[in-house]
Image (cartoon, coloured by chain):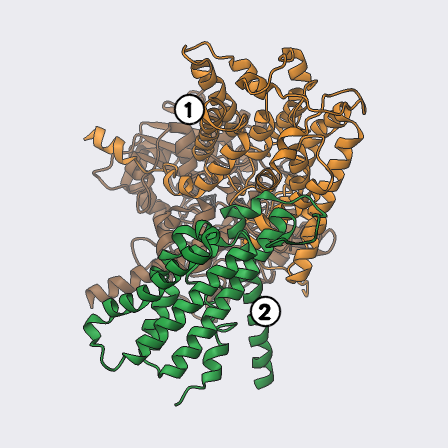
Amino acid sequence: MKRSVFYDFTKGFIEENPTFRLVIGMCPTLAVTTSVVNGFWMGLSVIFVLVFANVFVSLLRKVTPDEIRLPVFVILIATPVVIVELVMKAYLPAMYEILGIFVPLIVVNCIIIARAEAFAFKQPVLNSLADGLGIGAGYTLNLILISGIREFLGTGQITIGSFRFPATPFFEPAAVMLTPPGGFICLGLLMAILNVLLARRERKTKAQAV
Amino acid sequence: MLRARTLSGGVHLDDRKISSGKPVEFAGIPPEIVLFMSQHTGAPAKPVVKPGDRVLAGQVVGEAQSFVSAPVHASTSGIVKAVENRYHPILAKPSTAVVIEPDGKGEIWEGIAPGSDDISALSPEDIVKIARNAGLVGLGGAAFPTAVKLSPPKDKPIDVYLLNGAECEPYLTCDARLMVEEADEIVFGFMAMMKAVGAPRGIVCIEDNKPEAIMAMERAISGKPGIELCVLKTRYPQGGEKQLIQVVLGREVPPPPGLPFDVGVVVSNVGTAYALAKAIRTGMPLVDRVVTVTGAVRSPSNFRVLLGTPVSFLIEKAGGYAGEPGKVIMGGPMMGISLPRTDVPVVKGTTGIVVMTRDEVNLDKPLPCIRCGRCVDACPLRLLPVWIAAYSDRGTYEEAEKYRALDCCECGVCAYRCPSRRPLVQSIRLAKQAIMEERRARAQKASG
Amino acid sequence: MTERLVVSPSPHWKTDKTVPALMLDVVIALMPAVIASIVFFGWKALAIILTSVSSAVISEAIYEKAVKRDITIKDYSAVITGILLAMNMPPGVPLWMPAIGSAFAIVIAKQLFGGLGCNFVNPALAGRAFLMAAWPLHMTRDWLAPGFFGGVDAGASPTPLAVLKGESSGVLPGLWDMLLGNRAGCLGETSIIAILIGGIYLIWKEVIDPRIPLGFIGTVFVLTWVFGKPGAFFQGNAVYHVLSGGLFLGAFFMATDYVTSPVTARGRLLMGIGCGAITVLIRLWGGYPEGVSYSILLMNLVTPLIDRVVVPRYYGWKHEARKEKAL
Ligand code: SF4
Ligand code: SF4
């Protein structure tokens, strides 16, 4: 069965949402989501690496011997990571300071290796590209969502460059949201909400089917 | 007087012994007598009469089939109406019974011969034989054949015999009344028991909420060598065999299959001692017993009841229900069995009939366990009912077994105390059944 | 006869001490401390307590309604959580804090784990820990000097523990003031006598096991006496340590929470001692002046372990160790 490229793109948002459904790539999710800007750049880096790796793994899938596929993956992943790292260091040094170790660590981010192994190694290039974009975009949205909530509750406003919303916080910010426990609480609640919604949808479709 | 230790766990219950002042009266001959062949722990007896036969009081109607078993005797004279399956209150299923239509004469069988009044003339074997032929079983509720209890294995010498007059269940007064009215007979029977097992020392154990019984027994044992009195502080379930041994002697019976024999002790109920005394003196087998009919009845009473008398007949005799009945319990409120109907008969192990009104019946829905540990604190065997029940509810019976589900004596203290009203005993019982089933299956596989 | 009889397994009697009855006893036992807090901190204390309790009860009702569970607000457990949380707050906090704290305690720490009986930490303490992490300044600075019936002074007033630790300068209140409650501190921890009355009531009613509070307070006493003074042994101000901070409140009302303490008697003694040891560790060498609530939270987490390891010697069974000795 030929898979729909469109489906491979959209599945990353809900059904195979990496953070909330597949629960992979959690360390950067928890570590860098203290502000929307961080989350955005982190997400962008992951999209780039993911697409690059997916496309090349898929291109080379026919000529890669099974036994050495993991080393090949690692090289194919490490290359874009180095690119991201160098580019970021050159043009966004401040952001590089903040994201720090988590950029090189994308190499071992399980989202990317998981997609390479479970998807790109078996699927055509176009689907792999769509998968990389979709999963990456889903991941970025997650990061922005979590970091948005945490930043808003933790500092009282959302700051993007010199833009602040709301201009002055209208409540006293809860510092805990910027700490790891706050990250866990936020993540857990979002995950629970998504699960409840999906379960409800499933029940409805089942009820309709009957 | 011997000082008792404190019970580990247990609870103090409102004892409600409302019938304690009522002398034992004969309940009368009912219109129908139903004698189950299975009225005791062990193999059921085999019916030896046919419908149409005329039987007399004391005549054997069911013969013991094996070592752990007891014969059943007709409790009054009459015609055998049927040998058929009737609903058994304890087993909660139909079971073989001999049904007799009494003729109201109460004629005694010619085979009954008066025995002796002198224990020293009897050998231990004679006493065991009398107990066996009289169909004696423990009358405290467990109904274990007395003859078996009186024949401890030779390699386990018995140094103490405990006479259990604790009667720790609320409401019940049959043992207390018996001690007040028949103290001398009880002591006579007790001395015979001590002789049968060769115990040099005997201790009569009574809870301190029965001052009359204590006085009567104290008088009866005075001058009898080797017999002492031990007054216990009232606490449930002190009348349990294992608990009694613990509080009186400080010994602990090893876990099942350990028996009191293993720590050199035998325990018998005062009612059993009385029945043995009667069997020795008059030759009359076990055909009646004292039953307390109490709770929500118009006049709570203690009756001498012919075995096989229907419960409904007794409730009538006690003046009928006071208020709308909600539950009729055979036994005490803690360990008794609630009856689905009242046409079932009294069996050898029936200590009392307790009627609860509809308002007293608790139908609360159990709440989740709050881990308060009150069940743990109260368990007299120091088990962890909370875990046994939790594993049982989940169906993981091996875990329940590790927490010693099989040791549980089903005293009910844990479920009584649970603030969430969890049916702990029920869950534990389920686990026990499942574990035994599993063992049987395994044993079968191993042998087959 | 045609009577309709109920058939159910034994026992046919059940105690009257049901969950709501026990919880109501706890509420009653908390009353002296509640009254004391109102006496010392005035209407502010009352407002905090009322906010906290109503927030706890309302969030429980809303959550249970939303997930279609039985509404359990009648069992008083939410009320207790609300009162306990309020008792753990400085009297000067803004009112939205108890509201949020109670909602967090009930929804996140209790209901999301399955409701009463399933929560693994004490909800009130979880709520307090959350507030402490979220708005640390309010939770550590909003002390008020006590005054009778609303004589509330604005401004910060150091707690005895902070003084004891050398973090704030100030004079230690006299021992009598500590006992009565005439000192700065959280709402419910100031009056030792009020808490003691409640605690003794609970022990007398057999609602709580004295092993936990005695083990807890005893351990704190001994350890602070031995190690309390830097550089010298056996010279610590143990009496002061025992009387200050939230020790009595924690020992009698929070460490004894059924759900999060061990089910065996020996396990509970261990829990008390463990709480005491951790408290002293935090007070003497940790980063906070007070360690009672964190020590209880930590022991809450160890409780399942204690329950696994500490099992009683079942009747008739011999301990392995004893068996070896006998051989
Ligand atoms: S019923 Fe069993 S578990 Fe419960 S208290 Fe009695 S012996 Fe212990
Ligand atoms: S008494 Fe009931 S609520 Fe308490 S621990 Fe035992 S089972 Fe749980």
Residue displayed at 45% across by 59% down? B394
Q: Which chain is brown?
A: B
Pointer 1 local density, CA inside 10 Å: few below 14, some 14–19, many at least 20: some
Observer-side mark, 2 or 1, equals 2
Colour in which chain A is drawn: green
| Residue B374 place in picture, x, y as percent | 53, 40
What residue is pinned by disc 1? B228
The answer to whether any part of residue A210 appears in the image is no
Instruction: Answer with left or right where residue C96 lies relative to residue A63.
Output: right
* Nearest the eye: C293 or B428: C293
What residue is pinned by disc 2? A197
Residue A199 vs B236, above or below: the answer is below
The answer to whether any part of residue C102 appears in the image is yes
Residue displayed at 32% across by 53% down? B68
| Residue B283 place in picture, x, y as percent | 41, 45
Residue C280 vs B318, above or below: the answer is above
Q: Which chain is orange?
A: C
